[in-house]
Amino acid sequence: MKFFKIIILYTIIIYALLTSRSAIGNEVKLSEHEAYVLLDKLLTLSEKSSNQKVELDRSLERYKEWVKVYPKFSGNEEITKNKMKIYLFMVFIAHEKVMIDDQEEIAEEIMSIFTRQPEMMLSVLKELPFLMPSTCTSLNDHFDLFDRKEQKQQFIKKYEGNILKSLGKEQAGICLNKLRNQNFLK
């Protein structure tokens, strides 16, 4: 129950962040509908029905909306801090909802984003620590997907100091533990 309350609190904060003009400015354009799609995917708001066909139709409709929103924030172009927050929130949703196809895609692209902007990603994780476990798990999944043990060790060696400095001992310990574990999509 406590976890659920934390999720609701962070969801409200994220919704406010996503729809706030002052927070987003001109750098990211996320409509209220897109923010709803993200929150709906996390909380499964629109998939409750006593009719299985209606439920399936709504689920498919919401998935199609997710597929439209996801590439907009997935870091294929220059990423800003607010865009990074939205992307990492989407990573969080994919992990919470066990969206396997999206988790595999995330495992591949998150490393590219991290290596281009490590300080920014770590700054977002420090600011929004609930995003840290899913992000660090996704970074680990990048290595475990294709059995890249050597590359994983090199990555940890290269970035361990940055992670410790940016996240602090406790949060960094959690993140590094997730990175050291072999747990693709667990």
Image (cartoon, rainbow, N blue to C red):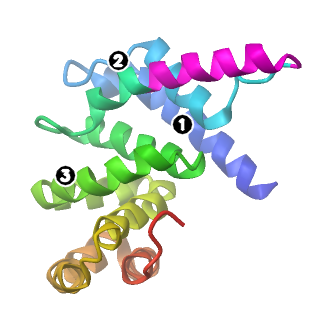
Instruction: Please state which amino acid type lies under the numbered disc 1.
Output: Ile
Residue 8, horizontal then vertical, whole percent? 67, 40
Mark 1 and mark 2 lie on one chain; the one further toward the N terminus is 1
SS under mark 1: helix
What residue do we see at 38% from left, 83% from top?
180
Measure how far apart labels 1 and 3 are at the Cα level. Answer: 24 Å
* Span colored in magenta: 50-66
Q: Quadrant of residue 13?
A: top right
What residue do we see at 38% from left, 61% from top?
138
Residue receiving disc 3 = 113
What residue do we see at 21% from left, 75% from top?
162
Is residue 103 left or right of 115 when viewed as pictured? right
Instruction: Please state which amino acid type lies under the numbered disc 3.
Output: Ile
Measure how far apart labels 3 and 2 are at the Cα level. Answer: 25 Å
- Neighbourhood count class around disc 2 (C-alpha, 10 Å): few under 14, some 14–19, many 20 upward: few
User: On residue 103, which mark appears?
Assistant: none
Residue nearest the viewer, comparing 63 with 137: 63
User: On residue 13, which mark appears?
Assistant: 1
